[in-house]
């Protein structure tokens, strides 16, 4: 049972919103989190697939980075205009939003900080493809180690 309010138990951070061809997602420091997930919402009908790839870093400034090669659970709703049901898909470290078939999608990529390399507590999404006419929004939803009225920052 959750004690206190939802906002005292779950951290939600805004990481990016803008054109789907130039995704510049903020880096999340997972040091203060038990678990978390990137929530991606893609809208628009211009057909250029958007590929989002997980990367790890030693700090939020991305001083040293590496592609994450451990698969993570991924869930998706391929048509958010018709509903909000998320279905499990193949675990991976990258996800392609097929804008030709599923232009309005929601994707959740879960992150267990234990999978990150020693000395690399940070994670972010890089992109390739996408279309400037489409929009992408990315949030971090995390389970902080310390709960309360003031939750730790995920991006500071």
Image: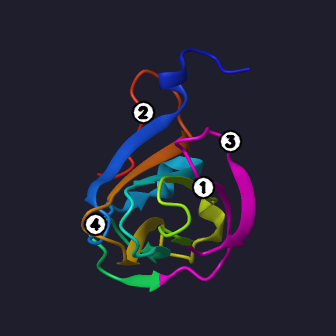
Task: Please determine whether, in this image, residue 93 is positioned above or below residue 60.
Answer: below
Q: Which mark is residue 24?
A: 4
* Mark 3 vs mark 4, CA separation in Å: 27 Å
* Mark 3 vs mark 2, CA separation in Å: 28 Å
Task: Please determine whether, in this image, residue 58 is positioned above or below residue 6.
Answer: below
Near mark 2 (Cα within 10 A), the count class, few <14, some 14-19 or many ≥20, is: some
Colouring method of the image: rainbow
The percent coordinates of residue 25 (x first, y second) are 33, 63
The percent coordinates of residue 125 (x first, y second) are 42, 69
The residue lying toward the viewer, choosing from 35 and 82, is 82
Nearer to us of marks 3 and 4 is: 3
Mark 4 and 2 residues: CB-CB less than 8 Å, in contact? no
Q: Which mark is residue 85?
A: 3
Q: Which residue is mark 2?
A: 151
Question: Is 79 within the magenta?
Answer: yes
Nearer to us of marks 4 and 2 is: 4
Q: Is residue 79 left or right of residue 103?
A: right
The residue lying toward the viewer, choosing from 74 and 19, is 19
The percent coordinates of residue 93 (x first, y second) are 60, 75
Kind of element beneath mark 4 = loop
* Mark 1 vs mark 3, CA separation in Å: 9 Å
In the image, the segment drawn in magenta is 67-95
The percent coordinates of residue 5 (x first, y second) are 54, 16
Assign the N terminus to one quadrant of the image: top right
Task: Please determine whether, in this image, residue 56 is positioned above or below residue 141.
Answer: below
Q: Which mark is residue 78?
A: 1
* Mark 1 vs mark 2, CA separation in Å: 32 Å
Residue pictured at 54% horizontal, 44% vertical: 80
Compare marks 4 and 1 and give the one earlier in the sequence. 4
Nearer to us of marks 3 and 2 is: 3
Mark 4 and 1 residues: CB-CB less than 8 Å, in contact? no
């Amino acid at each position: 049972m959750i004690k206190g309010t939802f906002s005292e138990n779950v951290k939600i951070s805004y990481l990016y919103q803008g054109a789907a061809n130039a995704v510049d997602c903020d880096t999340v420091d997972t040091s203060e989190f038990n678990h978390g997930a990137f929530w991606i919402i893609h809208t628009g009908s211009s057909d250029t697939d958007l590929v989002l790839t997980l990367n790890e870093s030693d700090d939020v400034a991305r001083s040293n980075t590496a592609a994450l090669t451990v698969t993570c659970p991924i869930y998706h709703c391929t048509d958010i205009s018709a509903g909000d049901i998320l279905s499990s898909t193949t675990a991976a470290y990258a996800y392609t939003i097929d804008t030709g078939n599923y232009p309005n999608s929601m994707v959740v990529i879960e992150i267990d900080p234990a999978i990150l390399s020693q000395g690399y507590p940070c994670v972010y999404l890089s992109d390739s493809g996408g279309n400037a006419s489409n929009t992408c929004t990315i949030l971090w939803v995390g389970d902080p180690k310390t709960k309360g009225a003031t939750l730790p920052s995920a991006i500071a």
